[in-house]
Amino acid sequence: MEKMPYRQELDTQVVPVSAEHFITTEWQRGLPVLTGESVTLRELRTSDAPSLFAMLTSEEVSRFISPPPATV
């Protein structure tokens, strides 16, 4: 694998963010919503299924996904 050259102009600065919601260690009950400047990460919802299926079955993506095992 090629070693990527260091590029100082790509250095990023960590910006502190205040927690608007309480933080819990009981993540099994529900995952927190993580929000950044241009992205929001949240738990999957049933309503996400059609768009997720469309993205994962496109030829552009599906060629990188291994098929499931024939038996369990």
Image: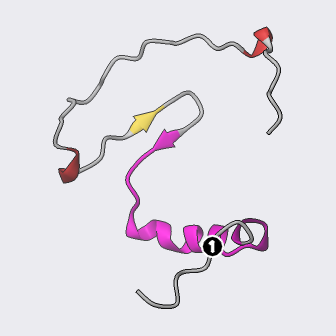
Position of the C terminus by quadrant:
bottom left
Q: Residue furthest bottom?
A: 71
The quarter holding residue 59 reads bottom right
Residue displayed at 51% across by 29% down: 36
Q: Position of residue 67 (x, y in %)?
A: 61, 79
Residue displayed at 52% across by 90% down: 70
Q: Is residue 41 depicted above or below 37 in this figure?
A: below
| Range shown magenta | 40-62
Q: Is residue 57 left or right of residue 33?
A: right
* Residue carrying label 1: 66
Q: Is residue 63 depicted above or below 29 in this figure?
A: below
Q: Amino acid at mark 1?
A: Ser
Residue displayed at 46% across by 44% down: 41
**Magenta span contains residue 55:** yes
Q: How is the image coloured?
A: secondary structure
Q: Give the camera-side residue of 26 and 63.
A: 63
Residue displayed at 18% across by 36% down: 25
The quarter holding residue 20 reads top left
Q: Give the camera-side residue of 2 and 36.
A: 2
Majority secondary structure of magenta residues: helix
Q: Is residue 42 depicted above or below 39 in this figure?
A: below
